[in-house]
Amino acid sequence: MHPTSTATTPLDVLREVFGYPGFRGEQAAIIDHVVAGGDAVVLMPTGGGKSLCYQIPSLIREGTGIVVSPLVALMADQVAALEAVGIRAAYLNSTLEPYEAQAVEQRLLAGELDLLYMAPERLVLPRTLDLLRRARIALFAIDEAHCVAQWGHDFRPDYLGLSVLAHAFPNVPRIALTATATRATHREITERLELGEAEHFVADFDRPNIQYRIEPKDRARDQLLHLIRSEHEGEAGIVYCLSRKSVETTAAWLNDHGVAALPYHAGLDAAVRHDTQVRFVREEGIVVVATIAFGMGIDKPDVRFVAHLDLPKSIEGYYQETGRAGRDGLPATAWLAYGLGDVVNQRRLIDQGEGSDPHKRNARAHLDAMLALCETTACRRVQLLRYFGQESQPCGNCDTCLAPPKVWDATVPAQKLLSALIRLERERGERFDSGKVFDLLLGKVNDRTEASRHRELSVWGIGQELSEREWRSVLRQLLARRIVEAVGDFGVLVPGPEAGPVLRGEAAVELAVDRTTTPRSRGRARSGADGARAGSRAADGLETAERQVFEALRTWRSSVAKEKKIPPYMVFSDATLVAIVQARPSSTAQLSAVSGVGAKKLEEYGDAVLEVLVEA
């Protein structure tokens, strides 16, 4: 326990150190279990308060809590956030000079640290294990534990070595935590980390403040710009793309259109990547365009939107990435645009990959589940949670709930498309990609169709009741249902495993009518001066006069953060500022009752906050 703290119970620590009035969900049960010396496997969504589950036991138990974190680049910010609330924290990683690392080791051995962060590859080194044996260790926390799953979306081989802790420190409690795990990944975490005797805690995976929206690509960058300008002007966001080239061109395009955007991918210089992370965390209103390498471990609570311009490979990856939005509990958007090309390309990448057959089957299953989420006409949240083994009711806050999609009987068009594929192969011995198949169905005469040979086919021009755009929608949805498949290097189309019943008239095909815009139920679209005010959506529930106070507090917070060279949220989060505005305290005693105002922050900022409230 920190020598200057008067807190004696987990709830005392929560209130005095972190400034929160009470625990959420299973936090209290997890903390009590670990404080008592028990091992735990914790599955809890991003923003659910996982870090408290090991931070508070580390403060209460004798010794130092050792936290395994996958990203060296973020440890400094993680430590700074703890120091901001009065916790003695440090990190050991390759960024430290030898004398700096030695000083941290001496603090550890002297019992002067509450928490110590390190990467898995450093922890399993014989020298590090010897150091830890000579120290008093309160617990081991293995964060982002899904990295141990070999078929997971963020597999890190170094995590496999962490099973050594079970043998090297049999009497030290271990807690493995992750925000994304199916039953299979959950089982793999348990087995590979040798946590067979651990207590398991599976929280509700729902993030009700996130609005999930998925729409067909139709000039995706224009769609993204509309999202930002109409709903998230001047707010922090992350845009995910699959390729490095797409990351760089999209970031440049957004900048050209007035959005402060930075690219991030593994091919950039390490110093550039570090600078991007620092700016994203410490400045307000920055949009990062990135590959999936970005975001893990970034504890930025006020990311107001996460957008995907390409189809994610799995629901686990999608959930992990979208979970980086709205960690403060305020409204946020998870938006995805995907098209026919995404489906074809993803399947081709799997088929051409060098993995084993079981690995490819697993990848196809992940993709099929992701496509099912994209093409569902029911509540997206219900489908998303069901994937993680949880049942729920329609949420009322996703696109399919807010504006239920229209469906139509597409059985005949599906049969026509399948017949065209069959006729081409049987009568011409040919397979075509989507473009040529559409030309055939529409009876288009151009260089692609080789019309002189194909006009004789009975399927020539049989699909003229639909436009090419409508056929693209039909094909995309048929691919998602495996009624049609795209195979080979060029994505040629063939009947899929589910085609038979459709061709025989034994199964009807109902498809959704595509749409490219979806309504919002909360907040309001903003433009002009109102939209330019950074962070204004965080205050959507405030009255006009309260908004002015909120903006005054944000201005004060920005100046403090700049002076201290820390991210603004380390002063106070947007959610805490909103709570201060609503409470309108007139004394430090009243301010201390606001969620997020702990003892150290009250002492450091209390008088200044009250002064801002008086002047506003």
Image (tube, grey):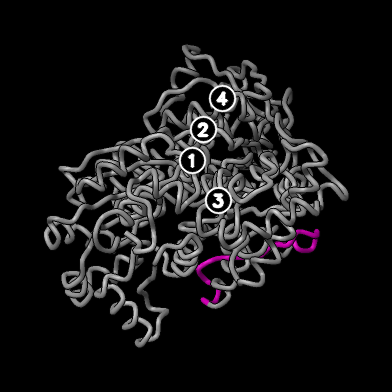
Q: Residues within 10 Å of mark 3 (few under 14, many from 20)?
A: many
| C-alpha gap between disc 4 and disc 3 | 31 Å
> Are the residues tagged 2 and 3 within 8 Å (C-beta)?
no
Task: Identify which amino acid the numbered label 1 is placed on.
Answer: Pro
Q: Write down the residue under mark 2.
A: 373
Separation (CA) of disc 4 from disc 1: 27 Å
148 relative position to 276: left or right: left
Element on which disc 1 rests: loop
- Mark 2 or 3, nearer chain start: 2
Q: Gap between marks 2 and 3, in whole Å?
A: 39 Å
Q: Which residues are magenta?
A: 254-270
Percent position of residue 400, x then y? 62, 26
Q: Residues at badges 2 and 1 in contact (C-beta under 8 Å)? A: no
Is label 4 in contact with label 3 (beta carbons under 8 Å)? Answer: no
Amino acid carrying mark 3 in the image = Val
Instruction: Name which residue lies at 36% across and 87% down.
Output: 99
Q: Which residue is mark 4?
A: 395
Q: Secondary structure at mark 4?
A: loop
Amino acid at the residue labelled 2: Leu
- Circles 4 and 1 in contact, beta carbons < 8 Å: no
Measure the alpha-carbon separation of dots 2 and 1. Answer: 37 Å
Calculate the distance from the C-alpha at mark 2 to the C-alpha at mark 4: 15 Å
N-term mark: 2 or 4:
2
- Mark 4 and mark 3 lie on one chain; the one further toward the N terminus is 4
Residue lying furthest bottom in this view?
Answer: 99
Give how far across and how far down residue 574 sits, in percent: 64, 49
What crowding class fits label 1: few (fewer than 14 Cα within 10 Å), some (14-19), or many (20 or more)? some
| Residue lying at 39% horizontally and 70% vertically, measured from the top left | 90
**Which numbered disc covers residue 597?**
3
Q: Quadrant of the N terminus?
A: bottom left
Q: Which residue is mark 1?
A: 21
Depth-wise, is mark 4 or mark 3 nearer the camera?
3
